[in-house]
Image (tube, helix red, strand yellow):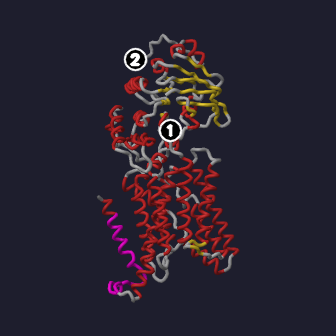
Amino acid sequence: MHIKIDHLHCSYEKNQIINDLCLEIKSQGHLTVLGANGSGKSTFAKAMSGLLTFEGKISFNQQNIATLSTNDKAKSIAYIPSKLESFDSFTTVEDFVLMGRFPHKEPFRDYSDKDYEKVADILEELSLTHLASNSLHQLSSGQQQLTLIAQALAQESQIIIFDEPTSNLDPKNALFFSKLLKSLQTTHTTILITHDLNLAFHIKGSLLFLARQKNHYFESSNEFFTQENLSKLYQAPFTLQTRSPGLAYE
Amino acid sequence: MSKYLLFLSLFAGFIMAPFVGEAPITLAGLFDPNSLEFRIFTELRLPRIFLAFFTGLILALGGLIFQTLFRNALMTPYTLGVSSGAVLGAGIAIKLGLAVSFLGINTTVLFGSTGALLTVVLLLFLARFLHKAEHESLLLLGIALSFFYTSALTVLFFLSSYVETHQILRFTMGSLSIIGFDTALIAFVLALVLFTYIYFQRFALQIISISDEQARLKGINTKKALYSLLGISSVAVGIMVSIVGPIGFVGLVVPHMVKKIYQKSLITLITPIALFGGFFLLACDTLSRAISSGSEIPIGVVTAFIGGPFFIYLILTRKKH
């Protein structure tokens, strides 16, 4: 799905967080979003997925999302928050992933056998099958993060936004995630919000560095990864010749 | 298995309940339509157990809805002051002496349900000034409203005549004693409407019980769901409160106990909570008739004696999120 953002402004409690952002992501394209803490990365994701009000215009396939019904919006875009909050302590992993099927469910009907099959396949793919009947509160934060990803995959939206997906994942799962993201890129339009520069470096696509005063957009993420850019934008010293351990993303 | 045993014993209680009370009922009397025993059984006891059952069901479902929508185990129409709003409304109607009745809906019920609904509207309005995460503050607002209503009721007592005061006072204690099936029928219809509405919304409610954000991401209009569900449950609870008086803590105790028994999430337990709520109030009512002779203990007192300590237990054993 093609995404076009025109003059996006977002503010939160009278603070301007995102200022005049314009960009386009082609169908099956990818955008990586970087930025310091509080630079508006999650705000950007929430505006895209309809959780926040904003000024400006966002369109999916030339259709203004302000005119989309809430259900159609859910079918177009899935947002995976960085962590899970839940009041109910007995919701199981399977029930939770099944909720991703809600936008596709017929009103007043139970989830269909097809929905259950879909969920089973996704749990299998993410190696969560053995946890299916565990409650969310029994999971580690890494397992919770994978469960959130599973739910978004069940939603079958063409656009997926990952908000710091690897922040709680161990190296093996982080590597698994990068492979998953790459395979999704062939069929979906993806947006990755992260602080994991090593991961961002290995994901091809365009890149947006958010900063309160100015948005820095790079057509190709390669253009961003220079020592000068990193040090200047993050306001911290960087080196690209490193002997410190880094995960070998492919 | 123990669940079925539980419901079986509750059902047995349901069968036995109409035989408990001041006047003994014999089987012989039951088969003689002209006997006093028969009339007591059909015109007093039977309507009463049905009223108790459906009232308990409505109060338990009201608790379920409030707890799910606010994602907090302490939120019920009773603890948030919605019941108190209904009491004040009904009290005003009694004081004004407006006893106009239309299709079984009299002014007491009209004022009572309006009081409940206005309280919810007021709570939602005040909640807009709270920070999102501060659900406990909403509970404090509800308690503050309850205090205010109690004071207003005291003013009402002050302004009322001796007879009116007595009437209002009796009302605030709660009573399930009725004559004939009219009131029980109203309770049945309300229970049916409330149950059906919640049942059809159960998948959306399941997601709402996770978080507001999750629900909106799945395309649910959470504002619409909140307003409609709070509205319908408050009106149902308000109507029952204005008929039988404030009966507290059913909406707090029942969902929690059923959740403990089944070890499942609240919103997947709509039917057990409804049934158990009905049986719970019926048991409390039977208890109130069984342990006292002469005049019965007000039903609100019985549920409060069970629910009060339970409320304290819930507060003390809460998990911090």
According to the picture, the residue beneath numbered tag 1 turns out to be A72
In this view, B75 is above or below B304: above
Classify the position of the C terminus of chain A by image quarter.
Answer: top left
According to the picture, the residue beneath numbered tag 2 turns out to be A250
* Amino acid at pointer 2: Glu
Q: Which label was assigned to residue A232?
A: none
Alpha carbon separation for disc pair 2 and 1: 35 Å
* Marks 2 and 1 close (CB-CB < 8 Å): no
Of residues A69 and B89, the one nearer the viewer is A69
Of residues A81 and B20, the one nearer the viewer is A81
In this view, B270 is above or below A133: below
Please, which chain is the residue tagged with disc 2 on?
A: A
> What SS does tag 1 mark?
helix
> What SS does tag 2 mark?
loop
Residue B28, magenta (yes or no):
yes
Of residues B129 and B47, the one nearer the viewer is B47
Residue A107, magenta (yes or no):
no
Give the mark, 2 or 1, whose residue is nearer the N terminus. Answer: 1
- Residue A206 position, x and y percent, is 52, 19
- Residue appearing at x 46%, y 21% in the figure: A199
**In this view of the protein, can residue A171 be seen by the observer?**
no
**In this view of the protein, can residue B174 be seen by the observer?**
yes
Q: State the extent of the magenta-drawn residues as a range.
A: B7-31
Q: Residues within 10 Å of mark 1 (few under 14, many from 20)?
A: some
* Amino acid at pointer 1: Asp
In this view, A95 is above or below A36: below
- Residue A8 position, x and y percent, is 62, 29
User: Which dot, 2 or 1, sits closer to the camera?
Assistant: 1
